[in-house]
Amino acid sequence: MAEKLSFDLVSPERLLLSEEVDMVVLPGAEGDMGIMGGHAPVMSTLRPGVIDVDVQGQPQRRYFVRGGFAEVTPAGLTILAEHTVPLAELDTAALDREIGNAEEDVADAKTDAKRQAAQEKLDHLKQLRQAI
Amino acid sequence: MASLKDLRNRISSVKATQKITKAMQMVAAAKLRRAQEAAEAARPYAERMDRVLANLSAGMAGRSDAPALLAGTGNDQVHLLIVATADRGLCGGFNSSIARLARQHINKLIGEGKTVKIVTVGRKGRDALRRDFGDKIVKSYEFTGIRQIGFAQAEDIAKTVLDLFEGGEFDVATLFYSKFVNVVSQIPTAQQLVPASVADTAESGVDLGGAVYEYEPDETEILEELLPRNLAVQIFRGLLENVAGEFGAKMSAMDNATRNAGDMIKKLNITYNRSRQAMITKELIEIISGAEAL
């Protein structure tokens, strides 16, 4: 593979991951994106979903994020995520809790725009639940 | 003059106190180290958040469709003060200096005819402000049962603030906390949260090599999602600084207390020895003069 991509995964509490990788696939707000070295600068919000980290010759690592934010600069990719769990450690019970929360959000939403946003989030979570 | 027994009791009680303050100092030192580590670990996220926000808001400046969290409501009539202090006392002037700064601020705002609302975080802050401004406190948080403050707590507070903001309950929000400089000095600080104060792009901007960011979805939507998150991050940072500051202040307060107790024990010991010696001398004189009289 060509250039390596320097990838940082940061949560508010600590730096989770900071290394050179080949490719990262992230759940962008408008569709999944694969980021490799030398990608054009992008800023994107993330929807709830799974981040795939690929390093050649190593097994793929997958993380579940509950939304967040990604920034690609010439220096590399930075993902700011509030809640990150390695997919292997994610159990269905935790996901069900998330879905429960999202359902409450939909019910509580005051404006239409908010309800729509919450509904979208709920749908993503449900899809994810089925995928596991 | 106190009897010898009184002095002995006094000395042992001061010694016991010294043992307690010494132990508290050591506990605070250990916790301070942990708090500093937590504050350090949280730094990368906050720095990157700042950078991204600075980039985005530079493009937003002066635009009429900028989100209210960034541009403000256009008013500054109602102020929300978030006063963050510790839950425990015995840490020198730490809590009272934050409360004093907040009180000055409140009085100034009231003097200008503004409306003030208060959210307190930490038991001591609530106790300090309740007497004078009890009717203005909207909500109080306490984290007594929590071992280490995490992002979840900050998010909780941020949610309350956002709900209030969306309900049109305030125009300007300011966070009061203590900035941790080092173990002996913590500076009470007021930081404006809403409208967001953003760092200058000139110093924090990234060199894109002439390229332009692509935004997905568009800038406004990203900002709208980012700003509430930024609020939580700022509060989280304030809370972490506060925790580190609390233990730093507690450490030096307890160090002083231990030293004072040491001085006191020394003085009491001298008095004790003197009066014991005086008593022995007196008894000797009595025996000798008795023997001479025979």
Image (cartoon, coloured by chain):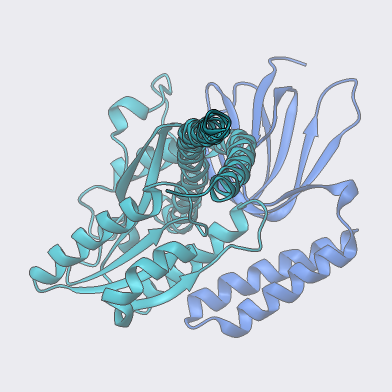
Chain colours: A blue, B cyan
> Residue B146, percent across and down?
66, 59
Residue that extends furthest to the left in the rendered view of this protein: B112
Q: In the rendered image of this protein, does residue B64 appear above or below residue B162?
A: above
Q: Is residue B244 visible?
A: yes
Q: Which of B100 and B180 is in front in this view?
A: B100
Residue A102 image point, x, y percent: 68, 73
Q: How many labels does the image show?
A: 0
**Looking at the rendering, in which quadrant would you find the N terminus of chain A?**
top right
Q: Is residue B271 above or below residue B73?
A: above
Q: In which quarter of the image is the C terminus of chain A?
A: bottom right
Nearer to the camera, B15 or B284 = B284
Percent x, y of residue B167: 37, 79
Residue found at the very far front of the displayed protein: B294
Q: Residue B92, percent across and down?
A: 41, 46
Residue at the spot 64% in from the left edge and 74% down from the top edge: A119
Locate residue A7: give its quadrant: top right
Front residue (pair A80, B15): B15
Horizontally, residue B58 falls left or right of residue A4, namely left
Image quadrant of residue A95?
bottom right
* Residue A29 seen anywhere in this rendered image of the structure: no
Identify the residue shown where x is 43% and y is 58%.
B224
